[in-house]
Amino acid sequence: MAISLKNQAAIAGVGMTELSKNSGVSELSLAAQCIKAACDDAGIAPSEIDGLVSYTLDSTDEIEVARAVGAGDLTFFSRINYGGGAAVGTILQAVMAVATGQANTVVCWRAMNGRSGQRMGQGVSASISSSDLIHWSWYMAYGMLTPGSWIAMIANKYMHKYGVTREDLGRVAISQRNYAQSNPRAFGYGKPLTMDAYLNSKMIAEPLCLYDFCQETDGGCAILITSAERARDLKQKPAIIRGVTQASTQGQEQMTSYYRSELVSLPEMELAARRVYAMAGLGPDDIDAACLYDAFTSEIIMQLESFGFCGEGEGKDMVRDGALDSDGRLPNNTHGGLLSEAYIHGMNNIAEGVRLIRGESTGQPEKRIEHVLVSSGVGVPTGALILGD
Amino acid sequence: MSDSPRNKPPQGHDNSWWWAMANEGKLGIQRCLGCQTLRHPPRPMCGDCHSLEWDAVEATGKGTICSFTVLHHPQFPGFDYPLITILVDLEEGTRVTSQLLQCDPADVKFGMAVEMHMHEDADGFKLPMFKPAQAK
């Protein structure tokens, strides 16, 4: 008999370090700081932590983190692959651990000197050390060495097929930059963006320009998960995990799933959508706000279709209607997102989902937020999460 | 072409034969010997019939542009910018990534007919690239 994970666990604490372009400290320090902050937020002592989950890309070992924060004995530790695709996957690990009694207090974290240290935008050429060397061989030799180059190939095809314009991408960038104006943590805070500035910014990988790209950031973000029952007795209003899933589909590559027949949708995100809605017993009409993964603006428009908020090719119409704005159908990335708050590999988007459920976002919409959808990295094996109040 | 050589693709059991064919001037496509299915990128096992046996056929080099991007930044040694990278639907039915030569970036079009041109770097490294197909 399968165990349903619906309503079994909750996010009881979130913690973030200062966000910067040069932290001046180690990634281990960032990890320890955000995990301690998540414990403080939940009102739990770090010594109660018995589970730790992170990304395979994270440089800090669980045992280093455990010693640094004074965690207790660990009975569950795990890692998820595929860059930002890991974000929600870490939560799934924690929920399964809690629901099956493997651990009681699990912290998921991502800590990175993503600007002053290894930058994602600098390409794979220098330091490929993973087992997918051969995979990258098809792209490296032809100069496709950066996430922007890989995503642009899909974005261009999608935009051509459905008549999506640069202005549509600009609308996404501006909507999220607008949210950043009320978020002092955000890189974009105090730096509003106009359509003129967007359209005249530096072209990087056509059709994507500078403002279509997320930030590169030094910082850490941690999410503390425990049972829903226990979370109700803790310090914060719990964000109940209604549904959570990972998803990878046929023909999946890491960023370069170029050999599927059509390149104008996100099959892995559609699978994540079907599964997360089914687990939660909810559909797109039940989702009040979202934190869709936004390493690139084009990904937001495509995900509106993957998650059924509109039909095929209609993502651009939702954006033109202002759906992503505070008074729109689906306020999205109300903290500014990876584009305008910071790039903590999607962990900071999960943190914002929790704030929306608590009613504590700096970009909190006026309407009641009952359910928030959060997604993981786009173009990679990914996942989706629905938080409820 | 830029003087500094491009980064060489990592090679191993599953892909070095493709680069060896390129070195002989050929664009290769892996063919399953169990069910004759062509596949690219190469894999050690056929996902359809699970045969480990395969050989390679030489593509005609004719195809059309499935998608493309023009890269401006960041710029890496060994490449000239703006750099047109393309996905080509080969007439054999498989798809390959490559570069488009002899074309103004403003003139690249979806569905455009292209043909293979075996490019050779100054250091002798060969790799299949494409150029616009000659008008008949």
Image (spheres, rainbow, N blue to C red):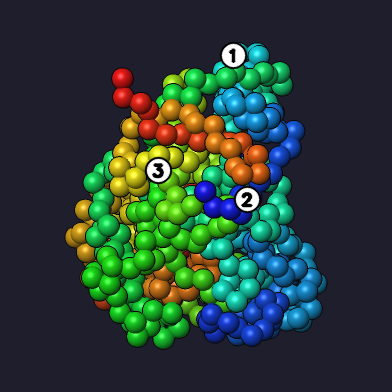
Q: Quadrant of the N terminus of chain A?
A: top right
Mark 3 closeness class: few <14, some 14–19, many ≥20 residues within 10 Å:
many
**Is A333 left or right of B29, judged from the image as shown?**
left
Amino acid type for the residue under numbered disc 2:
Pro
Report the residue marked by disc 3: B68
Residue B36 bears which disc, if any?
A: 1
User: If you read the primary sequence from the N terminus, does the residue marked by circle 1 or circle 3 appear first?
Assistant: 1
How far apart marks 3 and 2 lie (CA) works out to: 23 Å
What chain does mark 3 sit on? B
**Is A166 left or right of A115, judged from the image as shown?**
left
Mark 1 closeness class: few <14, some 14–19, many ≥20 residues within 10 Å:
few
Amino acid type for the residue under numbered disc 3:
Phe
Residue A257 against residue A277 in the figure, above or below: above
Q: Are marks 1 and 3 on the same chain?
A: yes
Q: Position of residue A341 (x, y in %)?
A: 43, 75
Q: Are marks 1 and 2 on the same chain?
A: yes
How far apart marks 1 and 2 lie (CA) works out to: 37 Å
Q: Are marks 1 and 3 in contact (CB under 8 Å)?
A: no
Residue B90 against residue A158 in the figure, above or below: above
How far apart marks 1 and 3 lie (CA) works out to: 29 Å
Amino acid type for the residue under numbered disc 1:
Gln
User: If you read the primary sequence from the N terminus, does the residue marked by circle 3 or circle 2 appear first?
Assistant: 2
